[in-house]
Amino acid sequence: MQSIKRILLSRMKYIGDIVLTTPVIRATREKFPDAYIAYLGDKKATSLLEHNPYLDEILSYDFTRPDILEQIRMIIQIRKRKFDVFVDFFSNPRTAMLARASGAPIRIGKDVKGRGKVYNHRVGDYGSMKSAIEFHYQYVKPLGVEMKYFTTEIFLTEDERREARIFLRHQDVDIAKPIVALHPGATWSNKMWDKNRFAELIDLLRAKLGVEILLSPGPEDQELMDSIINNTTANVHLLPVLPVRQLAAILSQCAVFVSNDCGPMHIGVAVGTKTIGIFGPEPPEVWFPYSEQDGHLALFKKIECSPCRTTSCFREGENFMECMQLISVREVFDEVKKRITPAQ
């Protein structure tokens, strides 16, 4: 393979997926220590890559701008940098077009009908289930990058951590106590553990452990937050909807993070907070490639239709969302307690 001096890695969306590429970023830097390595992705999500020492530059795609104008702007920026390699982890029509327009002689992407022809190294779906980290490693294999690192990383500055502590104090959070953060929302309805169980969990955590509790909302979660707060008697601190990097800094100050299967779950792990992921339709072996030795745990109850990988449960009556129903409040509480209370 020709001399490689300039590499563009791209995972255009989403928050969790971009975090899951961070081990590959580190491995690529190790393989090409002197190369110029840039990363292209959604402006909101790629803020999580700021201060990553293995990147030279972040190219942020602004989805708030008219798409055609942003595409033209991005093509100009990419071509100006004369990349030798464009690695397209996402491989949707937009990123395939950007790869083709990049001028990079080496283009790596998914082998999909039609746009797969854009790439001269194509990654196929070989049918075996693999973690999201392993999936991303396939795309840099043609470059000789070894599957070596598996820990996700978000690099926060000391100033960001300090500002997070100040913010929490302004929210009347007693930062001398252990803090447990909860994220009850998710993109899909059947990824969401029952809101009343989150309320029960809050009451149990306050009564039994005396911890401070943060509720982390998504942009569309106001009604969900109101319902949970109205159904708990405990004091709970509702965070505003935060930019993802500020959320990362807040989660770095927490002892434990309990989250449905969604982007913030991956942020919690990547900042080193012990994270409990609640899973329903998606297989945790794909989306939770994290070590229990580091305090992380996926709670998942396999039933006859698992993993269904659907956006809403097709079962009815008492079997509706059975996989989620089988995850009890007591089980989640006990796992939080293990991570708060040192073993005797």
Image: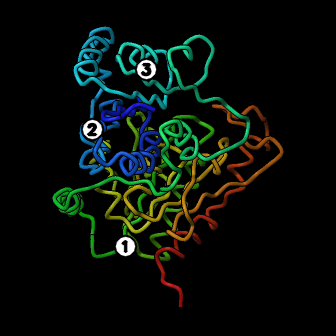
In the rendered image of this protein, does residue 102 appear above or below residue 155? above
Contact? badges 3 and 2 (CB < 8 Å): no
Contact? badges 3 and 1 (CB < 8 Å): no
Dot 2: few (<14), some (14–19), or many (≥20) neighbours within 10 Å? some
The residue type indicated by label 1 comes to Pro
Dot 1: few (<14), some (14–19), or many (≥20) neighbours within 10 Å? some
Mark 2 / mark 1, whichever is N-terminal: 2
Mark toward the viewer: 3 or 2: 2
Q: Which residue is mark 3?
A: 95
Residue 320 in picture, x, y percent from top left? 74, 40
Residue farthest to the right, as pictured: 304
Q: CA distance from mark 2 to mark 1?
A: 41 Å
Horizontal relation, residue 181 to residue 195: left or right: left
Residue 152 in picture, x, y percent from top left? 43, 54
Horizontal relation, residue 251 to residue 191: left or right: left
Residue 145 in picture, x, y percent from top left? 48, 45
The residue type indicated by label 2 comes to Tyr
Q: Which residue is mark 2?
A: 36
Q: CA distance from mark 3 to mark 2?
A: 20 Å
Mark toward the viewer: 3 or 1: 3
Q: Which residue is mark 1?
A: 178
In the rendered image of this protein, does residue 287 appear above or below residue 101? below
The residue type indicated by label 3 comes to Thr
